Amino acid sequence: MISCRTLGPLQVTVDGARAPKKLMWRRNIALLLYLARAPARRCTRDHAIGLFWADKDDGAAHQSLREATSTLRRYLGDDLRTPEDQLELATGAVELDTEQFDGAGRELQGPAPRPSSEVSSPRASKCPRHRRSRTGCSSSGDTGIAA
């Protein structure tokens, strides 16, 4: 398993040991991290080329992507799939501190807020003077709401 600490200085380990230098090459690790955070952990080859090798001509960009995927596959094995024109990372192939951080944030938030239609508004509350819904009260008296 590859573990990445990206909050703070980048630290990457492969099966608990320091990551090999070739994996840590800037575009190799950038591609790995991008796939790990991408929706459904996948992107098209053309999208990856546009992100990481836009400065190269088409042939050189495709060759660079092949080299990067070959390097990643050396450490990910079958967890990196390349069906048709896609690059796809298996769930659980990479452990990210950002996912742990996101999970902790969700736990701290508690249950999801109620939809706004369920939240009572001041106008829907009872009129203190007539003990009925404010929306039906035409009292000119104090409504209990500060202007």
Image (tube, helix red, strand yellow):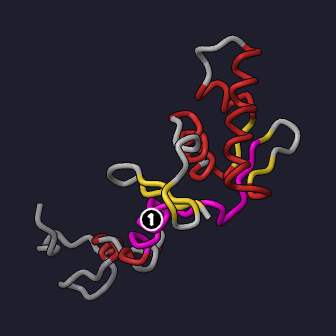
Which residue corresponds to the image point at 11% horizontal and 60% vertical from the top-left? 147
Residue 25 spot, x, y in % from top left: 53, 36
Q: Quadrant of residue 132?
A: bottom left
* 110 vs 142, nearest the viewer: 110
Residue that appears at 48% across and 57% down:
18
Q: Which is nearer the eye, 23 or 6?
A: 23
Identity of the amino acid at label 1?
Asp
Q: Is residue 103 magenta?
A: yes
- Neighbourhood count class around disc 1 (C-alpha, 10 Å): few under 14, some 14–19, many 20 upward: few
Which residue is drawn at the image coordinates 70% and 55% (left, top)? Answer: 76
What span is in magenta? 87-106
Give the residue pinned by disc 1: 102
Taking 32 as reference, is 146 left or right?
Answer: left
The foreground one among 71 and 39 is 71
Q: Residue at x 59, y 28 (%)?
A: 51
Find residue 86 and report its horizontal and vertical position in percent: 79, 40
Q: Position of residue 34 (x, y in %)?
A: 57, 44
The reply, left or right, for residue 144 in relation to residue 59 is: left
- Against 54, residue 42 (above or below) is below
Q: Nearer the viewer, residue 128 or 122?
A: 122
Residue 115 sits above or below residue 67 on the image: below
The verdict on residue 128 being magenta is no
